[in-house]
Image (spheres, rainbow, N blue to C red):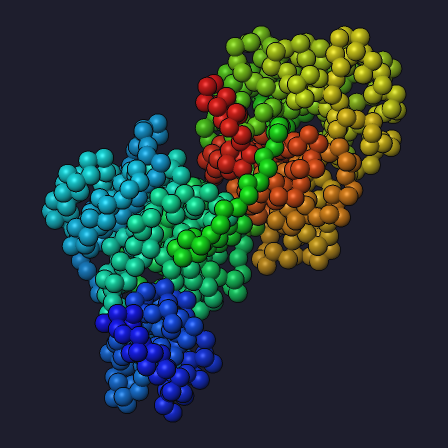
Amino acid sequence: MSDDTNSALNRLKRFTRIFLLTRTERAFLHAAEKSGLFDPVYYAGAYPQIHTLFHRFALRHYIVYGEKRGLRPKHDFSPNAYLNYNPDVAATGMSPFHHWVQVGHREGRVHKELPKIEEFPEITSPKLRLDPDRPRARFAVVAHVYYPDLWPEFAETLAALTIDFDLYVTLTYRGDASDALAEEIRDAFPRAVVVPVANRGRDILPFMTLVNAGALDGYDAVCKIHTKKSPHREDGDLWRRHLIGGILPENLPELLARFIADDALAFWVADGQFFHGTEWWGTNFEVTRHLLRRIEIEIGFDDLSFPAGSIYWIKPLTIGLLKSLKLVEAHFEIEQAQVDGTIAHALERVMGFLAKAADQTVVQTTELEAAKPKPALPKPAFTTAFYLPQFHPISENDAWWGKGFTEWRGVVTAQSQFAGHLQPLLPADLGFYDLRLTEIMGEQAQLARGAGIDALCVYHYWFDGRRVLEQPLDRLLSRPEIDFPFYLCWANESWRRNWDGLSGTVLLEQTYSDGFEEALVRDSLPYMRDARYCRPDGTRPRFMIYRPEDMPDPVASVARMREAWRAAGFEVELGAVCFHVGGESEVSDDLFDFWVEMPPHGLVKGPDYLFGGPDGNKLGRDVAPGFSGLVYDYKRVIGNSVSPAYVKTLPANTICGAMPSWDNTARRGPAAHIAYGANPASFRYWLNQIRTHRLEKSYRGELFLNAWNEWAEKAVLEPSASFGTLYLNVLAHEIAREDTRSDAATA
């Protein structure tokens, strides 16, 4: 009988009893408190029948009442199992949990039921091929059925849902019985996708099979449930219903709307299912760290929190990050009733770190019910990304780097320089394109618009009248039907063999000969007259200069450029890059209409270096032989970018900037500069920090991204083999306005 179904007098007597402990009970209380092994959050969440009066004194309730009823003091401790596996304790008549907290946990005694090994027929897991353009509901529910006798319970729960959802069911294959169950499921849910799977990787591998196939792409949120019997628990059925009922409650539409609206949330779990503390590592730390290094996420042993039980709602970003781990069936161990240390166990813990990497967290049901709406963060009024027109062969590169050279050559040969260094990064949807094929630019622009990017700032390579890499834009001018919003940035550095514009043998020099200003303006006019050339303020065509400090007389040159444009009928909005490296001339802040922040320039300080800085190797592991480059912490760069001290160094009329990544291994090999820890999750964090701290004071509320397609510097937003469209998905969520999404959909 539950505590709250009796009379008030009886409840009061029972409540008073927990303060009148016997000597043995007081010793039990002291030992449990000292050990810290009792979990009051779990206890209150797992047993909702316990009256709320006892929640503040959960341990006392357990000592007096809970253990006698077979309740569990923590997720992975079963009183009955402890006595069964430890008959010497049972013979003493001592409380099982009292013995565990006093000596048993130090002795490594078995404290939960060990699963039995079952024999299953062999099956080759199918290769799922789903139409990416198929109609989708807003939500998906994924149910893994290991115990077929529980399907009727699941069917009843799913049929009662008041949301529109697509159903995916994975069945641990048991032969003819599973075939019959699959037909039963399809009869009840005709749109369901039913997938038989081998008994491998618990419920995790079946879920990853759907993730890897792209089945769960495009949903606002996905619910993951499984037939959890928990044979090691005496209250297994009650526990399962608590976990599933907690995330599929009667007021599901309301709570789901709150979950989706709160960008700080990655997972929604039932009460008691957000676990914290190093005691939950077991033997899973090294495997978890290895998995997360696949996408440059570093973890520490002392920082563990995760959604437990593998029953939750999960958002699209986290699903995309799981896909980027590139885990397939062969990575998962054969089922042998392992209780710890497998890929499946590690992945359960990975979830919390994926959320944290994006500055998100896990919410429990009662917390979601009590949550208040948060004010919306501002979005950029206009967003630009730098665009490199390099990807086609030219005679100059043939001469300097070899016949047919483009930067793809370095991209495909880039090598990882230390464990966890993600290289090479290779293209996906657009392939190894040649920008002489103008249709590619149209496809790029469509992707950019869909992600909220309003314009692509194309590097304009002009050396005293000599044009280089001009073919893509010149071909674009002859194709007015291709939508490609752009403006120019004069890349006025000399070309050098070291690729940095500052050192090495000069390959193509910028000389600034007399009259260069008028000639440069004259060459820009055909582009400015094109209907696709952008005027972010609605009136003035925009033009940028990469390094104005390299010009011999920036003030006079800028004045001559402005006058030449006016003579041609244009009042130009003129900007420049905040390069943070001195040049030949000083440039005052007010010389240009605006400045552009271009990470990582000016954002990396001594303490940020993980390798090659003043403190030597802080990576915690060796680098490749011969590596002499620099490695710095991407997340620390984010912190620098929003620090008041740094922001004060920028001109007031600066457009704030961000970079998806930075790593020029493709160009410089073992001498590369690497921003370690860059991935779509940490990029989401940077965008969120900009929206929170920087955007309102950014010039015209704009945002500048470095870059769209700098593949040899890994500063890439385009789809990649590693992350698919995840960077674009993050952008769309964080910055896209409704008008840009509508324009992209129309295009």
Is 326 above or below relative to 444?
below
Instruction: Please tell me which residue lies in front, 498 or 447.
Output: 447
Residue 107 visible to an observer of this rendering = no
Q: Residue at x 62, y 28 (%)?
A: 382
Residue 56 visible to an observer of this rendering = yes
Indicate the quadrant where residue 219 lies. top left
Could you tell me residue 520's position as x and y percent?
77, 14
Is residue 559 shown left or right of residue 107? Answer: right
Residue farthest along the bottom direction in this orientation = 23
Question: Which quarter of the rendered picture does the N terminus lie within?
Answer: bottom left
Q: How many marks?
A: 0
Could you tell me residue 221's position as x and y percent?
39, 42
Is residue 153 shown left or right of residue 556? Answer: left
Could you tell me residue 601's position as x and y percent?
71, 39
Indicate the quadrant where residue 661 lies. top right
Is 341 above or below relative to 717?
below
